[in-house]
Amino acid sequence: MKHLLIILSILLLSSPLFGQSEKPQTIIVPTGSLGEISEIRKKMLEKTLESKLDDYFDIVPKELFEEAQEQAFQEMDADECTEEQCIMMIREILQVENSFQMVLMEEEGDTQISLTWNDLDKKRVEEEYCEGCKTKQLRKMIEGLVEKLIGVKNVEQVLVETPKVVPQVVQETVVHKTEEDKTKGLFVTVGDKGTILISSDGISWISRESGTSEHLHGITNKNGLFVTVGGKGTILTSRDGISWTERYGTLNGHKSSAWLFGISEGNGIFVAVGDKGTIFTSSDGTQWTSRNLKVDMYGDSVPKTTDEFKGVIFGNGLFVTVSWNGTIFTSSDGTIWTERQIVNTKRLVPLRGVNYGSEIFVAVGHDETILTSKDGVSWTQVRTGTYNLNNVIYKNGLFLSSGTDGRTLNSSNGLRWEVMTPETKVDLFGVSYGKREFVFVGKNGTVRTSPDGIGWTSRTSGTTENLYGVTYKE
């Protein structure tokens, strides 16, 4: 099946910087696209939008935008100047307020176009869908969307300040703040065969090239930097979720081939964990140092344990990692690690995830095992069952854990848990929270979102690969 996803980003901006006129002024940002699309078709659609917007707005010369763009490039490092960040910088330079965004999605000849208008008061969205559309039909759709979205009445509200307009602006102030929150941040999920998907809202997902075919298991972010880890020592970093750079850890002067499954950040460092007792730390995501080592009989440095670490978290000044062997290790600095005791259990079971919240650590694993600890040192088993748990998160006063067949458990204190069984059963592997939504990812590209951890909505990810980790960056 041939998929084509084209994203056309248009920014409409009005500012007193360019003087006064009867029509608001607008800047049109150069079109971006994904997939195969001819330059001729792209230009035709751009001209159609520009021509229609010109009915309501004065088009700011392209040179002014390019000057602001150049200034943004000079003030930001190249790897920091992502599309979103650069546009924000350009908006500041030009002191702009309004923005339009047009998105064109096409699959096997079927096309959906959405047009979004953000201003200081609220967010407006209109969309159209057409089967087997030609360029002529797409041009008509664009014109219709502009008419429906803007219209003469809306433009008059921008141009004319009258007492009648004031009450309407006041009423919509709260709506503006809510929508503004939703336009910030980025979800990134990773999975089999180097799969990386990004989303601004957890609903619509776009595939990105990772540069690797290795399975990716864990992902986190710190200070604007995404870091994901995976098979054969794979470590990738990215500032924007789009362009990824390969990194690696070393042991005895050689690149490590250990599989990495979990990653977290805290106390100013990243900590990545994996099989064969592998633990790496990094202060910047670029250089990685092997930890928890001893010297063997040949004089080589080797991990102190052969346990297969699956998850890691930082909380209450302590790193905690859990293993497939059912063990738990802790460290205050990421360098020296100590195995901890688990009480009230007859046998060790594989542990898959760990998190911290409400002044308590919670670790989860196979057989619905849930362990808790106040200090990360002494651990107590509080629950066992029949199915497996793969992850755990704490947000908004709630612990959430999920696993086999999509079952989820929730708890306010980590001690008493309620089981929720979904209508559609599919294994879930990773979880994150952002935009006031929990986002779970899992088998065969499954993505589910929930505002409360109780009612869930399935989303289309665009992939059938297993998704293992997901994170959210403000």
Image: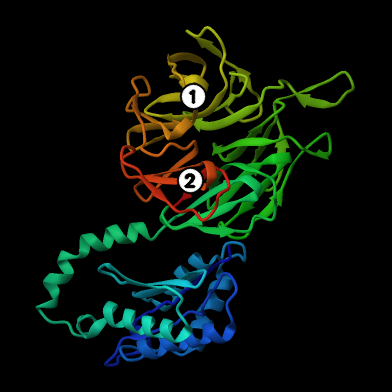
Dot placed on the residue nearer the N-terminal end, 1 or 2? 1
Q: Is residue 3 above or below residue 328?
A: below
Residue placed under numbered mark 2 in the picture: 446
Looking at the figure, which quarter contains the N terminus?
Answer: bottom right
- Residue furthest toward the right? 298
The kind of secondary structure element at disc 2 is loop
**Res 92 quadrant in image:** bottom left
Give the side of residue 141 with respect to residue 287, left or right. left
Residue 277 appears in which quarter of the rendering?
top right
- Judged by depth in the image, the label closer to the viewer, 1 or 2, is 2
The reply to whether dot 1 and dot 2 touch (C-beta < 8 Å) is: no
> Where's residue 85, x and y in %?
49, 65
**Is the residue marked by circle 2 packed among few (<14), some (14-19), or many (20+) residues within 10 Å?**
many
The answer to whether residue 368 is seen in the rendering is: yes
The image shows residue 462, relative to residue 400, as above or below, that is below
Q: Residue at x 71, y 48 (%)?
A: 247
